[in-house]
Image (cartoon, rainbow, N blue to C red):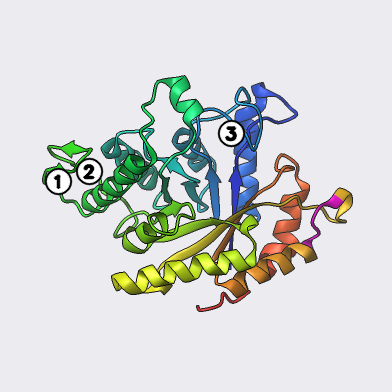
Amino acid sequence: MRLGLQVPSFTWANGQSQLGDTFGLIAQRAERAGLYSLWVMDHFFQIRNVGPAENEMLEGWSALAFAAGRTNHIKLGTMVTGVTYRYPGLLIKTATTLDVLSQGRAYFGIGAAWNEQEHNGLGVPFPPLAERFERLEETLQLAHQMWAGDDKPFNGKHYQLERPLNSPLSIQKPHPPILIGGTGEKKTLRMVAQYADGCNLFARLGNDELKRKLDILRDHCQTLGRPYEQIEKTTLDTLRLTRDGRDGTMTPAAAIEYFTGLAELGIDQAIFNMPNVSEAEPFELLATEIVPVVEKIKVAGR
């Protein structure tokens, strides 16, 4: 089983003047701890479940490029890019650039977008949900075309590209892994089965609901003729790790038990954020007590 770290907040006790140093140190600690991946949100305002909109928020792809320069092998992704934020050809070019300059470490995390507040605040059009899903599907189609080196015209309902040239091509072949975030049963999970290499589900749904969502994904795969085993199943959660479990936090033993339960459901990679991420203690625990055990856990169905 693999573990990944998401960093959803850049508001830390040492202040904005040290933000770059702190984020760079977090990326390095995550890599040294043996974590497989590092993720940032693709938002421009802080989201309501994390803090007020006015809190510090870094643009996701620039932040990942910065992290790539501070690390050597940890995978890097957005959890997840809203399809409405950028023209799809430019978004695919951005992801390709990260993959090339990081020597093949990029994930392409994408979803239908939801935060109307930041769209309105920054002057980004926010079409209805049905249209956003149409745009997501066209973007996924275009990603496969551009990463295949096919620059023939793309004529979709929402996007028309005369020559979607993408040079250089990505380091990862056939392309950086495409991960779609979301739990929608009719559209999102169907698109995972049809276009993606991975899905991301909220762990807070609970094991029974996670299993149900995975069964629906399996059904979509069967309908489309796609091997279910080809898709990386990931979850997202919030964990606060301490050595002694003080103040309602999670001990290393409890964390291992938690990750084992996810592996038994068939989750390949457990991604989590940590409210105490700017401290050294959780990374020391991950490096010495958690990752060496969890990476030996067999994932059900693998």
Q: Residues within 10 Å of mark 2 (few under 14, many from 20)?
A: many
Residue found at x 35% / y 38%? 94
Q: Amino acid at mark 1?
A: Asp
Name the residue carrying label 3.
47
Is label 3 or label 2 in front?
3
Instruction: Say which of marks 1 and 2 sits in front.
Output: 1
Q: Residues within 10 Å of mark 1 (few under 14, many from 20)?
A: some
- Of the pair 112 and 171, the residue shown nearer to us: 112
Tell me, for residue 166, which label it has, or none.
2
Q: SS of the residue at dot 1?
A: loop
| 1 and 2 marks in contact (CB < 8 Å) | yes
Label 2, secondary structure: give it.
loop
State whether residue 270 is above or below residue 278.
below
Q: CA distance from mark 1 to mark 3?
A: 37 Å
* Residue 235 circle label: none
Which residue is most to the bottom?
301
